[in-house]
Every structure is written in structure tokens, then in C-alpha cells.
Amino acid sequence: MAQKVTCTVTERSWLSPTVFELIVEPDVPVVARGGQFMSVIVPGRGPAGRDLRRAYSLAGFCGPAFRLCIKLVPGGPGSNFLAGLQCKEQFQALMPYGDFCWEESAHRHVFVATGTGIAPFRAMLEEAPRQATVYFGVRSADELIYLDACRQRGATLLTALSQEQERVRVTTIFQQHHIDFDRSTQFYLCGNGAMIQDMRALLEQKGVTKDRVAYEKYYS
Ligand SMILES: Cc1cc2nc3c(=O)[nH]c(=O)nc-3n(C[C@H](O)[C@H](O)[C@H](O)COP(=O)(O)OP(=O)(O)OC[C@H]3O[C@@H](n4cnc5c(N)ncnc54)[C@H](O)[C@@H]3O)c2cc1C
């Protein structure tokens, strides 16, 4: 069950020109699984000065602390609030939420991510490394994050750059580098809504049943 926690930022760094990482430690121990997220309370940034909430996937586990990776959205209250926090500063959150987690009954795992949608997959691989294939789409090469972390956990990684010379989308890479799958393959989709919609349609065409497709939509 989710609980309210006060998190202290213990480390911060930039992973790409627009994505930063925070290591945050809750004031009380929290048991969470890869694929779950925290709901950050963004103080006073809502209408009439009310608080806002924004969801961020856990990107990994560092003892009692958690890794977050956040895309800085120009003018976005949540991402700018977190980008402004320095080490030792605190924020409040509710966690853990979500059931976008490893499907224990599956023998193969196929992850499809765009942008910071790679975060929950990094955490899942850290929690329980298994045979997994990761299809990862970003706009440009400098946005490719966590490649080594995924490879070190045994994942096969295929990347797509949508706004560089080749202009390839992750859905295209998925079709080009088709993998064998069967009833025991679980698909996980995370990131922007358009990719999720396209992938779900594609998987349906290929005869994958809905119960084998889990997804977490970050935005439309
Ligand atoms: C379950 C869940 C988990 C999430 N986990 C993460 C995470 O691990 N890392 C993360 O960066 N975001 C994550 N998000 C998105 C996050 O909750 C916010 O929507 C995002 O940080 C923008 O909030 P904002 O207040 O800064 O900007 P807003 O003003 O709320 O958003 C402005 C616009 O930014 C765009 N946008 C939102 N999120 C992203 C993104 N990740 N990448 C590119 N464009 C975006 C959308 O077009 C949105 O309309 C998650 C969302 C959900 C629902």
C-alpha cells in the first residue's frame, strides 16, 4: 500500500542534455518493485497555488534509496521542480504505486520504450535479470540512456533514432528485427501514447493476446 514519504536527494546528475537522474532516499523504508512509480507532490505549482502530483517510475534501487530519471520538459512544473532540487534537499511523495511489473509466468520478456520510458525496464532488469529484448526509441543518439545498465543485466538492445539521418521509429525496428515469440512471451510498452497505440495494434495483428501486453503511458 502506498505511503507518504519525505525523500532526500542524495545524488543528482545529467544523463543527457535533457534527462537528469536523482537518487532519492525516503525517510522510512519502502518496499517497491521494478516497474512501480512514486507520485511526487509538487508544492504550490497548481491552480490557485495548490499542490500538484506527478508520477515518476523507479529506475533502480540503491539500498534504501531509489533512482529516478526525469526528462526536463520546458515550462513543466513537475520536471522543473525536481530539476531545481540540490543534494540534501527534500520533497514529499506517495509510493509505491502500480502493477507494471515482471510477469512471473513468462519465459521471454520484450520491452519497448521511448525516451524516459526506459526507466521501469532498467529497474525490472536490476531486480530480476532474465532473458529480455529491449527496443528503445529516442530522437537523437545523445538521448540513449542506460544502455550499459541494460546490457550488463543480459538484455539484448535494439535502438531507433527518429530524428537523425536514418529517421527510424522504434515500431519499425521492432518489425525489422522480429523475434520469435510464443504464448509465454510477455510484452511491456512504456513511454509516449502514440508508440503504445501503434505497438498494441501491431501486436494484435501478430496475434498476441491482450493479456500478454502490459503498458504504462507517460503522456498522450
Ligand atoms: C506512471 C507514470 C510514470 C512516469 N514516469 C516518468 C519518468 O520516469 N520520467 C519522466 O520523465 N516522466 C515520467 N512520467 C511523466 C511525468 O509524470 C510528467 O508528466 C512529466 O514529468 C511532465 O510533467 P511536468 O509537470 O514537468 O510538465 P507538464 O506540463 O505536466 O507536461 C507537459 C508536456 O510534456 C510532455 N511530457 C510529459 N512527460 C514526458 C516525458 N517523460 N518525456 C517527454 N515529454 C513528456 C507531454 O507532452 C506533456 O503534455 C510518468 C508518467 C506516468 C503516468
Image: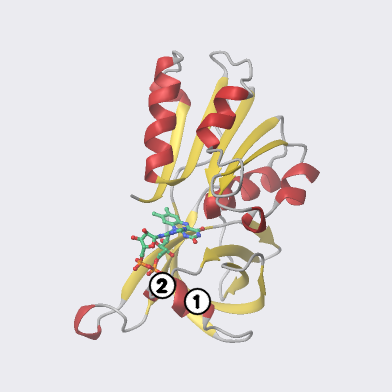
Question: For the N terminus, which image quadrant?
Answer: bottom left
> Which one is nearer the viewer's eye here, 63 or 181?
181
Q: CA distance from mark 1 to mark 2?
A: 6 Å
* Residue 209 versus residue 78 in the image, above or below: above
Query: For the view shown, which residue lies furthest in the right direction?
Result: 152
Q: Is mark 2 within 8 Å of ligand 1?
A: yes
Q: Position of residue 185 (x, y in %)?
A: 57, 21
Q: Quadrant of ligand 1?
A: bottom left
Determine the residue positioned at 48% across, 56% down: 37
Q: How many marks?
A: 2
Q: Label 1 CB, ligand 1: below 8 Å?
A: yes
Residue beneath the point at 61% across and 20% down:
178
Residue pictured at 45% horizontal, 79% vertical? 81
Up/down of 30 relative to 44, above or below = above
Which residue is labeled 1 in the image? 82
Q: Which amino acid, by three-letter code, is at mark 2?
A: Gly
Q: Which mark is residue 78?
A: 2
Return the x and y of residue 122 as percentages of the image width and height. 65, 49
Q: Position of residue 109 (x, y in %)?
A: 61, 29
Tag 1: amino acid? Leu
Q: Find numbered disc 2 in the image and state the secondary structure of the residue it sits on.
A: helix
- Which mark is on residue 160? none
**In the figure, is residue 27 to the left or right of 51?**
right
Q: Decide: marks 1, 2 in contact (CB < 8 A)?
A: yes
- Tell me which residue sits at (56%, 72%) in the image: 28
